[in-house]
Amino acid sequence: MSYVVFDILSQVALGLFLIMPPTFLFVHYRWKPRWHPVFLFLGFIVLGWLLLNVSHHLYYESLFLQVGATPNPSDELRDRMQSDGAANVFTLLFGWLFAAIYFTIWFALFRIGQWAWKRLNFKAAAPSSSL
């Protein structure tokens, strides 16, 4: 397979990671399913960790194929391909933490949005006392 395919798949996995929390939370608060937000949180930690690892692996696989496909690869390209040790370890061991922080930020934004929506609707529904 071409390195372009791996690069595209890496970007798709990263895009799914970025779009999943707001989508999950929108569905949860719009249609009010009976499951608790903690299950959303735990589910996204697992899926987010998986998507981050897949994206990371595919990115470095595309670099490896790009170096192999280039007749005289530049030193910069070789350095990017070979400097993946710390990034691999961090993504593998602490990708779940990044997913947890990312989901928590979105959860806080949704809760603030809910609070503001209720405040605005409450003030709009209150009768005016001016004569």
Image (spheres, rainbow, N blue to C red):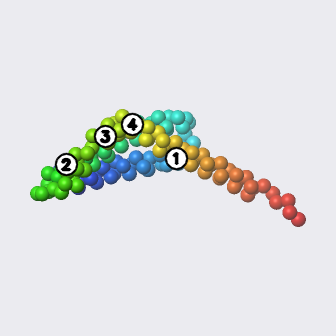
Q: Earlier in the sequence, mark 4 or mark 1?
A: 4
Q: Which residue is disc 1 drawn over?
A: 106
Q: Secondary structure at mark 4?
A: helix
Mark in front: 3 vs 1: 3
Q: Earlier in the sequence, mark 2 or mark 4?
A: 2
Q: Is residue 114 left or right of residue 15?
A: right
Residue 7 in view here:
yes
Q: Which residue is disc 2 drawn over?
A: 64
Q: Is residue 36 placed above or below 19 in the rendered structure?
A: above
Q: Secondary structure at mark 3?
A: helix
Residue 66 in view here:
no
Alpha carbon separation for disc pair 2 and 4: 24 Å
Alpha carbon separation for disc pair 3 and 2: 17 Å
Q: Earlier in the sequence, mark 3 or mark 2?
A: 2
Look at 21% across and 54% down and name the residue there: 77
Question: How many neighbours does mark 4 have within 10 angstroms: few (below 14), some (14-19), or many (20 or more)?
Answer: few
Tell whether label 2 touches label 1 (CB within 8 Å).
no
Alpha carbon separation for disc pair 4 and 1: 19 Å
